[in-house]
Protein backbone atom coordinates (compact mmCIF):
# COMPACT_ATOMS: atom_id res chain seq x y z
CA UNK A 1 0.00 0.00 0.00
CA UNK A 2 1.40 3.38 -0.95
CA UNK A 3 1.68 6.02 1.71
CA UNK A 4 -0.21 9.10 0.62
CA UNK A 5 1.29 12.50 1.21
CA UNK A 6 -1.66 14.80 1.77
CA UNK A 7 -0.70 17.92 -0.16
CA UNK A 8 -2.40 21.10 -1.23
CA UNK A 9 -2.53 19.61 -4.72
CA UNK A 10 -4.82 16.77 -3.61
CA UNK A 11 -7.19 19.02 -1.68
CA UNK A 12 -7.16 21.49 -4.57
CA UNK A 13 -8.13 18.73 -7.03
CA UNK A 14 -11.03 17.62 -4.85
CA UNK A 15 -12.09 21.18 -4.21
CA UNK A 16 -11.89 22.14 -7.87
CA UNK A 17 -14.30 19.35 -8.76
CA UNK A 18 -16.71 20.60 -6.11
CA UNK A 19 -16.63 24.13 -7.51
CA UNK A 20 -16.92 22.95 -11.10
CA UNK A 21 -19.70 20.43 -10.59
CA UNK A 22 -21.59 21.67 -7.56
CA UNK A 23 -24.06 23.72 -9.56
CA UNK A 24 -24.46 21.54 -12.65
CA UNK A 25 -27.99 20.33 -13.43
CA UNK A 26 -28.78 17.09 -11.62
CA UNK A 27 -29.79 15.48 -14.93
CA UNK A 28 -26.09 15.19 -15.73
CA UNK A 29 -25.84 12.34 -13.21
CA UNK A 30 -27.69 9.05 -12.76
CA UNK A 31 -28.69 6.85 -9.82
CA UNK A 32 -28.53 9.78 -7.45
CA UNK A 33 -29.52 9.78 -3.81
CA UNK A 34 -30.40 12.66 -1.54
CA UNK A 35 -29.93 13.45 2.12
CA UNK A 36 -31.75 16.62 3.10
CA UNK A 37 -30.40 19.33 0.76
CA UNK A 38 -27.41 17.31 -0.51
CA UNK A 39 -27.87 15.31 -3.73
CA UNK A 40 -25.09 12.97 -4.88
CA UNK A 41 -24.20 9.76 -6.69
CA UNK A 42 -23.05 7.07 -4.23
CA UNK A 43 -19.98 4.97 -5.08
CA UNK A 44 -20.89 1.57 -6.55
CA UNK A 45 -20.23 -1.50 -4.46
CA UNK A 46 -19.65 0.38 -1.21
CA UNK A 47 -21.45 -0.40 2.05
CA UNK A 48 -24.15 2.13 2.91
CA UNK A 49 -24.91 2.78 6.58
CA UNK A 50 -27.72 5.23 7.41
CA UNK A 51 -27.30 7.15 10.66
CA UNK A 52 -29.27 9.83 12.45
CA UNK A 53 -28.71 12.98 10.43
CA UNK A 54 -26.08 11.37 8.21
CA UNK A 55 -25.23 8.50 5.89
CA UNK A 56 -21.87 6.79 5.38
CA UNK A 57 -20.41 4.84 2.48
CA UNK A 58 -17.43 2.63 3.28
CA UNK A 59 -15.06 0.33 1.45
CA UNK A 60 -12.23 -1.94 2.62
CA UNK A 61 -10.00 -3.72 0.09
CA UNK A 62 -9.61 -7.50 0.03
CA UNK A 63 -6.34 -7.48 1.96
CA UNK A 64 -7.97 -5.22 4.56
CA UNK A 65 -5.05 -2.83 4.36
CA UNK A 66 -6.79 0.10 2.70
CA UNK A 67 -10.06 1.77 3.60
CA UNK A 68 -12.16 4.80 2.78
CA UNK A 69 -15.27 6.16 4.50
CA UNK A 70 -17.39 8.99 3.06
CA UNK A 71 -19.90 10.62 5.38
CA UNK A 72 -22.63 12.97 4.18
CA UNK A 73 -24.27 15.02 6.93
CA UNK A 74 -27.70 16.63 6.76
CA UNK A 75 -27.95 20.39 6.96
CA UNK A 76 -28.17 22.31 10.20
CA UNK A 77 -28.52 25.99 11.05
CA UNK A 78 -25.46 28.00 10.10
CA UNK A 79 -23.32 29.35 12.92
CA UNK A 80 -23.46 32.76 11.23
CA UNK A 81 -20.67 32.58 8.65
CA UNK A 82 -18.96 29.95 6.45
CA UNK A 83 -15.67 30.12 8.44
CA UNK A 84 -17.56 29.49 11.68
CA UNK A 85 -19.42 26.59 10.06
CA UNK A 86 -16.13 25.04 8.93
CA UNK A 87 -14.42 25.57 12.29
CA UNK A 88 -17.33 23.96 14.14
CA UNK A 89 -17.55 20.98 11.78
CA UNK A 90 -13.78 20.44 11.71
CA UNK A 91 -13.65 20.42 15.50
CA UNK A 92 -16.52 17.96 15.90
CA UNK A 93 -15.81 15.64 12.96
CA UNK A 94 -12.01 15.63 12.72
CA UNK A 95 -10.23 17.11 15.74
CA UNK A 96 -12.20 15.36 18.47
CA UNK A 97 -12.47 11.83 17.00
CA UNK A 98 -9.07 11.66 15.24
CA UNK A 99 -6.91 14.11 17.24
CA UNK A 100 -5.95 15.85 13.99
CA UNK A 101 -4.47 19.32 13.89
CA UNK A 102 -6.90 22.05 14.87
CA UNK A 103 -5.88 24.58 12.22
CA UNK A 104 -5.80 23.00 8.73
CA UNK A 105 -5.07 24.81 5.50
CA UNK A 106 -8.29 25.53 3.62
CA UNK A 107 -9.54 26.42 0.16
CA UNK A 108 -12.57 28.66 -0.30
CA UNK A 109 -14.90 29.23 -3.27
CA UNK A 110 -18.34 30.73 -3.81
CA UNK A 111 -21.04 30.25 -6.44
CA UNK A 112 -24.81 30.58 -6.78
CA UNK A 113 -25.26 31.82 -3.21
CA UNK A 114 -23.28 28.96 -1.65
CA UNK A 115 -19.78 29.02 -0.22
CA UNK A 116 -17.66 25.89 0.06
CA UNK A 117 -14.65 25.58 2.37
CA UNK A 118 -12.43 22.50 2.07
CA UNK A 119 -9.57 21.47 4.34
CA UNK A 120 -7.50 18.36 4.96
CA UNK A 121 -5.06 16.90 7.47
CA UNK A 122 -3.21 13.69 8.31
CA UNK A 123 -3.66 11.79 11.57
CA UNK A 124 -2.66 8.50 13.21
CA UNK A 125 -5.13 5.60 13.08
CA UNK A 126 -4.12 2.40 14.89
CA UNK A 127 -0.45 3.17 14.42
CA UNK A 128 -0.73 4.01 10.72
CA UNK A 129 -1.21 7.29 8.90
CA UNK A 130 -4.65 8.21 7.59
CA UNK A 131 -6.17 11.34 6.12
CA UNK A 132 -9.32 13.42 6.40
CA UNK A 133 -10.73 15.85 3.85
CA UNK A 134 -13.75 17.88 4.96
CA UNK A 135 -15.87 20.10 2.74
CA UNK A 136 -18.40 22.38 4.39
CA UNK A 137 -21.13 24.09 2.36
CA UNK A 138 -22.83 27.22 3.69
CA UNK A 139 -25.64 29.36 2.34
CA UNK A 140 -29.20 30.58 2.89
CA UNK A 141 -28.91 30.14 6.65
CA UNK A 142 -27.88 26.47 6.45
CA UNK A 143 -24.70 24.41 6.41
CA UNK A 144 -23.98 20.82 5.38
CA UNK A 145 -20.78 18.85 5.00
CA UNK A 146 -19.08 15.87 3.40
CA UNK A 147 -16.15 14.11 5.08
CA UNK A 148 -13.77 11.66 3.44
CA UNK A 149 -11.46 9.55 5.64
CA UNK A 150 -8.99 7.23 3.92
CA UNK A 151 -5.50 5.73 4.12
CA UNK A 152 -4.51 5.07 0.51
CA UNK A 153 -4.18 7.24 -2.59
CA UNK A 154 -6.14 4.72 -4.65
CA UNK A 155 -9.31 6.28 -3.19
CA UNK A 156 -8.57 9.82 -4.38
CA UNK A 157 -10.21 9.22 -7.77
CA UNK A 158 -13.36 7.84 -6.12
CA UNK A 159 -13.53 10.79 -3.73
CA UNK A 160 -13.13 13.08 -6.71
CA UNK A 161 -15.96 11.33 -8.56
CA UNK A 162 -18.18 11.61 -5.51
CA UNK A 163 -17.59 15.35 -5.17
CA UNK A 164 -18.33 15.77 -8.87
CA UNK A 165 -21.83 14.45 -8.28
CA UNK A 166 -22.80 16.81 -5.45
CA UNK A 167 -25.62 19.28 -5.95
CA UNK A 168 -27.23 21.44 -3.28
CA UNK A 169 -30.99 21.96 -3.37
CA UNK A 170 -31.90 25.62 -2.83
CA UNK A 171 -35.59 24.83 -3.26
CA UNK A 172 -35.50 22.57 -0.21
CA UNK A 173 -33.84 25.33 1.78
CA UNK A 174 -36.52 27.83 0.79
CA UNK A 175 -39.27 25.39 1.71
CA UNK A 176 -37.75 24.62 5.09
CA UNK A 177 -35.57 27.52 6.22
CA UNK A 178 -33.21 26.89 9.10
CA UNK A 179 -33.78 28.71 12.37
CA UNK A 180 -31.32 31.49 13.01
CA UNK A 181 -28.30 30.20 14.88
CA UNK A 182 -27.38 32.06 18.03
CA UNK A 183 -23.64 32.63 17.69
CA UNK A 184 -23.41 33.06 21.46
CA UNK A 185 -25.31 29.89 22.32
CA UNK A 186 -22.24 27.95 23.51
CA UNK A 187 -22.71 27.81 27.28
CA UNK A 188 -18.95 27.80 27.79
CA UNK A 189 -18.69 31.12 25.98
CA UNK A 190 -21.42 32.99 27.82
CA UNK A 191 -21.34 31.28 31.20
CA UNK A 192 -20.29 33.23 34.25
CA UNK A 193 -17.42 30.81 34.96
CA UNK A 194 -15.77 31.30 31.57
CA UNK A 195 -12.15 31.67 32.68
CA UNK A 196 -11.02 33.05 29.33
CA UNK A 197 -12.95 36.30 29.72
CA UNK A 198 -10.58 39.24 30.13
CA UNK A 199 -7.37 40.55 28.58
CA UNK A 200 -4.26 38.40 28.11
CA UNK A 201 -1.00 39.85 26.85
CA UNK A 202 2.64 39.05 26.18
CA UNK A 203 5.70 40.53 24.51
CA UNK A 204 9.07 39.40 23.28
CA UNK A 205 12.20 41.18 22.05
CA UNK A 206 15.71 40.33 21.01
CA UNK A 207 18.74 41.21 18.97
CA UNK A 208 19.90 39.78 15.69
CA UNK A 209 23.62 39.89 16.35
CA UNK A 210 26.48 42.34 16.87
CA UNK A 211 29.37 43.53 14.76
CA UNK A 212 33.05 43.04 15.65
CA UNK A 213 32.96 46.14 17.86
CA UNK A 214 30.03 44.81 19.83
CA UNK A 215 27.47 47.18 18.34
CA UNK A 216 23.95 45.82 18.00
CA UNK A 217 23.19 45.19 14.35
CA UNK A 218 19.46 44.92 14.77
CA UNK A 219 16.79 44.47 17.40
CA UNK A 220 13.05 44.59 17.73
CA UNK A 221 10.00 43.72 19.77
CA UNK A 222 6.51 42.32 19.36
CA UNK A 223 3.80 42.95 21.95
CA UNK A 224 0.22 41.69 21.61
CA UNK A 225 -2.97 41.32 23.58
CA UNK A 226 -6.17 39.29 23.30
CA UNK A 227 -9.37 40.46 24.95
CA UNK A 228 -12.07 37.78 25.20
CA UNK A 229 -15.54 39.13 25.91
CA UNK A 230 -18.36 37.24 27.58
CA UNK A 231 -20.62 37.63 24.51
CA UNK A 232 -18.31 35.43 22.40
CA UNK A 233 -16.46 38.26 20.65
CA UNK A 234 -12.76 39.02 20.91
CA UNK A 235 -10.27 41.70 19.92
CA UNK A 236 -6.58 41.33 19.21
CA UNK A 237 -4.10 44.18 19.22
CA UNK A 238 -0.40 44.05 18.44
CA UNK A 239 2.56 46.36 17.96
CA UNK A 240 5.75 45.32 16.19
CA UNK A 241 9.00 47.26 15.82
CA UNK A 242 11.33 45.60 13.35
CA UNK A 243 14.58 46.94 14.78
CA UNK A 244 17.22 49.54 14.11
CA UNK A 245 17.50 48.75 10.42
CA UNK A 246 13.86 49.85 10.05
CA UNK A 247 13.78 52.17 13.02
CA UNK A 248 11.14 54.46 11.53
CA UNK A 249 8.48 51.77 11.07
CA UNK A 250 5.95 50.65 13.68
CA UNK A 251 3.48 47.96 12.64
CA UNK A 252 0.15 48.19 14.46
CA UNK A 253 -2.40 45.37 14.07
CA UNK A 254 -6.05 45.44 15.13
CA UNK A 255 -8.33 42.43 14.71
CA UNK A 256 -11.90 41.65 15.72
CA UNK A 257 -13.91 38.46 15.53
CA UNK A 258 -15.65 35.74 17.53
CA UNK A 259 -14.47 32.74 19.52
CA UNK A 260 -15.90 29.46 20.72
CA UNK A 261 -14.83 27.07 23.45
CA UNK A 262 -15.39 23.31 23.29
CA UNK A 263 -13.64 21.54 26.13
CA UNK A 264 -9.93 22.29 25.83
CA UNK A 265 -10.21 23.63 22.26
CA UNK A 266 -10.46 27.38 21.70
CA UNK A 267 -11.32 28.45 18.15
CA UNK A 268 -10.92 32.08 17.08
CA UNK A 269 -12.64 33.27 13.92
CA UNK A 270 -11.56 36.75 12.78
CA UNK A 271 -13.93 38.98 10.86
CA UNK A 272 -11.57 41.89 10.28
CA UNK A 273 -7.81 42.30 10.60
CA UNK A 274 -5.90 45.44 9.61
CA UNK A 275 -2.23 46.37 9.98
CA UNK A 276 -1.22 50.03 9.88
CA UNK A 277 2.42 51.02 9.45
CA UNK A 278 3.34 54.37 11.04
CA UNK A 279 6.52 56.38 11.43
CA UNK A 280 7.86 57.75 14.72
CA UNK A 281 5.57 60.77 14.51
CA UNK A 282 2.52 58.58 14.03
CA UNK A 283 2.03 59.43 10.36
CA UNK A 284 0.48 56.54 8.45
CA UNK A 285 2.84 55.13 5.87
CA UNK A 286 0.50 52.42 4.61
CA UNK A 287 -2.25 50.02 5.68
CA UNK A 288 -2.95 46.45 4.68
CA UNK A 289 -5.67 43.85 5.18
CA UNK A 290 -4.40 40.68 6.81
CA UNK A 291 -5.38 37.14 5.94
CA UNK A 292 -8.14 35.97 8.27
CA UNK A 293 -6.62 33.04 10.18
CA UNK A 294 -9.22 30.74 11.72
CA UNK A 295 -7.18 29.04 14.41
CA UNK A 296 -7.89 26.26 16.86
CA UNK A 297 -5.80 26.17 20.03
CA UNK A 298 -5.52 23.64 22.83
CA UNK A 299 -5.83 25.91 25.83
CA UNK A 300 -5.14 25.60 29.51
CA UNK A 301 -4.51 27.84 32.50
CA UNK A 302 -1.21 27.09 34.24
CA UNK A 303 0.23 28.55 37.43
CA UNK A 304 3.90 29.50 36.99
CA UNK A 305 5.37 29.55 40.49
CA UNK A 306 8.39 31.63 39.49
CA UNK A 307 6.16 34.38 38.14
CA UNK A 308 3.49 33.83 40.79
CA UNK A 309 0.86 34.11 38.10
CA UNK A 310 -1.66 31.89 36.38
CA UNK A 311 -1.20 32.33 32.63
CA UNK A 312 -3.08 31.31 29.53
CA UNK A 313 -1.31 28.70 27.40
CA UNK A 314 -2.38 28.36 23.75
CA UNK A 315 -0.92 25.45 21.79
CA UNK A 316 -1.26 24.87 18.07
CA UNK A 317 0.61 22.83 15.51
CA UNK A 318 2.14 25.70 13.51
CA UNK A 319 3.03 29.29 14.27
CA UNK A 320 0.45 31.82 13.09
CA UNK A 321 1.08 35.21 11.51
CA UNK A 322 -1.09 36.79 14.18
CA UNK A 323 0.71 35.33 17.20
CA UNK A 324 4.25 35.29 15.84
CA UNK A 325 7.00 32.99 17.10
CA UNK A 326 6.26 30.31 19.68
CA UNK A 327 7.28 30.90 23.28
CA UNK A 328 10.38 29.11 24.51
CA UNK A 329 8.98 26.73 27.12
CA UNK A 330 9.91 23.05 27.52
CA UNK A 331 6.75 22.29 29.49
CA UNK A 332 4.47 23.57 26.72
CA UNK A 333 6.00 23.09 23.25
CA UNK A 334 4.45 24.88 20.27
CA UNK A 335 2.73 27.37 22.53
CA UNK A 336 1.90 30.99 23.15
CA UNK A 337 1.81 32.03 26.80
CA UNK A 338 -0.04 35.16 27.90
CA UNK A 339 -0.71 36.73 31.27
CA UNK A 340 -2.99 39.30 32.86
CA UNK A 341 -0.41 41.17 34.93
CA UNK A 342 1.37 42.55 31.88
CA UNK A 343 -0.35 45.57 30.31
CA UNK A 344 1.21 46.66 26.99
CA UNK A 345 2.03 50.33 26.56
CA UNK A 346 1.17 51.16 22.98
CA UNK A 347 3.16 53.78 21.14
CA UNK A 348 0.02 54.90 19.33
CA UNK A 349 -3.48 54.50 20.79
Image (cartoon, rainbow, N blue to C red):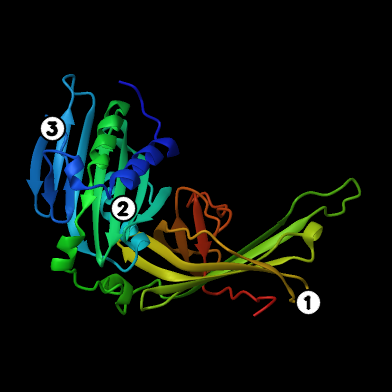
Dot 1 falls on a residue whose secondary structure is loop
Of tags 3 and 2, which is closer to the observer? Answer: 3
C-alpha separation, residue under disc 1 versus residue under disc 2: 45 Å
Image side of residue 24 versus residue 230, left or right:
left
Q: How many marks?
A: 3
In this view, 181 is above or below 110: below
Dot 3 falls on a residue whose secondary structure is loop
Q: Position of residue 262 (x, y in %)?
A: 30, 62
C-alpha separation, residue under disc 3 versus residue under disc 2: 25 Å
In this view, 159 is above or below 205: above
- Residue with the mark numbered 1: 281
The residue carrying pointer 1 sits among few (fewer than 14), some (14 to 19) or many (20 or more) residues within 10 Å by Cα, namely few
Q: Are marks 1 and 2 in contact (CB under 8 Å)?
A: no
Between disc 3 and disc 2, whose residue precedes? 3
Q: Position of residue 146 (x, y in %)?
A: 24, 47
In this view, 346 is above or below 70: below
C-alpha separation, residue under disc 3 versus residue under disc 1: 67 Å
Image quadrant of residue 228?
bottom left
Residue at point 18% right, 64% down?
Answer: 173
Query: Which quadrant: the C terminus?
Result: bottom right
- Residue with the mark numbered 3: 46
Between disc 3 and disc 1, whose residue precedes? 3
Residue 63 visible: yes
The residue carrying pointer 2 sits among few (fewer than 14), some (14 to 19) or many (20 or more) residues within 10 Å by Cα, namely many
In this view, 244 is above or below 181: above
- Residue with the mark numbered 2: 90
Amino acid sequence: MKELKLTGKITSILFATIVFCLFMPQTAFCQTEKLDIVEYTPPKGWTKTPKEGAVTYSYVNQSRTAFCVITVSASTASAGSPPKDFARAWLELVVKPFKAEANPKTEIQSADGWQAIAGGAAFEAEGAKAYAILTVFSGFGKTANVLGVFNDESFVAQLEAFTQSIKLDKAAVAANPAPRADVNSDPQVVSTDNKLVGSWATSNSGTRGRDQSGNVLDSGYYKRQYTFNRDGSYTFKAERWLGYMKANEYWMTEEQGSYTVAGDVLTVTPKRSITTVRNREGVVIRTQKNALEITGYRWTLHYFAGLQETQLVLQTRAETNRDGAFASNDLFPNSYILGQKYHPEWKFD
